[in-house]
Amino acid sequence: MLPGSAARSRLPGQSVTEQLALRNRTPEQIRYVLISHLDVDHISGSPLLKGAGTFLVSGPELRGAREHQIKRCGDIRLTPFELEPIPYGPYGLGKDVYGDGTVYLVHTPGHTAGLTSVLARVEGGWLLLVSDAAYSESSWSEPILPGNTSSDEEALSSLEWIREFSRRDDCLAIIANHDPSVQERTY
């Protein structure tokens, strides 16, 4: 780490605790936290959500976890969910969170073996949060594989499914975690 880089590693107002405070919320008011995958940049903030309900992670992702990844979660208890048939995704596997088709955890492996995207029914259509299955729109439109993959073949299948889903009339937005062009918006 470069001298002084720790102070620049996070933009003011961007931490999960700051975002919750802006909305007059606390971790205790959160029913589910999805851990999309266990890369350090996706789990290092999980202890900030201590007190939230259930921390979900896919069974394949948790089974493939390394000790240092689990340690990064602090004393947060990770609850695995097993993949079951759903009507979406490159493999038609994931979890219907509420059992009513409003929020699906979609198995989109490739970057990691158990990476999970979120597909949420919102007013007017669907919102797809792809985590690191893709880094930006060019990832699924060209396609460009993530920088690191557990399987190039699975990553490509996930990108192809994202591209197909992006062409649906009822797809309102696809958001990739590391896409600098994403603007804050309410759906």
Image: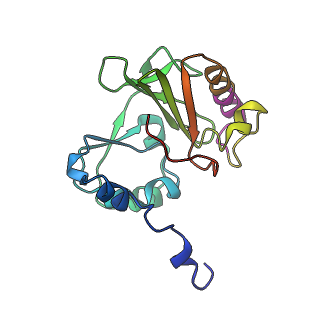
Where the N terminus falls, by quadrant? Answer: bottom right
**Number of callouts:** 0
Give percent across and percent down for residue 81.
36, 32
* Quadrant position of residue 109: top right
**Residue shown at 58% from the left, 78% from the top:** 5
- Give the colour scheme shown: rainbow
Give percent across and percent down for residue 50.
26, 57
Give percent across and percent down for residue 90.
59, 22
Q: In the image as oriented, which residue stretches furthest toward the bottom?
A: 3
User: In the rendered view, would you say 49 is above or below 139?
Assistant: below
- Residue range corresponding to the magenta coloring: 149-159
* Quadrant position of residue 62: top left
Where the C terminus falls, by quadrant? Answer: top left
User: In the rendered view, would you say 142 is above or below 34?
Assistant: above
25 vs 58, nearest the viewer: 25
**Residue shown at 62% from the left, 42% from the top:** 111
Q: Does the magenta stretch include residue 60?
A: no
- Name the chief secondary structure element in magenta: helix
Q: In the image as oriented, which residue stretches furthest toward the right?
A: 142
Give the side of residue 76 with respect to residue 170, left or right. left
User: In the rendered view, would you say 160 is above or below 11?
Assistant: above
Is residue 158 in view?
A: yes
Give the side of residue 174 with respect to residue 146, left or right. left
**Residue shown at 46% from the left, 57% from the top:** 69
Give the side of residue 100 with respect to residue 161, left or right. left
136 vs 2, nearest the viewer: 136
Is residue 108 in view?
A: no
Q: Is residue 150 magenta?
A: yes
142 vs 84, nearest the viewer: 142
Give percent across and percent down for residue 32.
30, 40
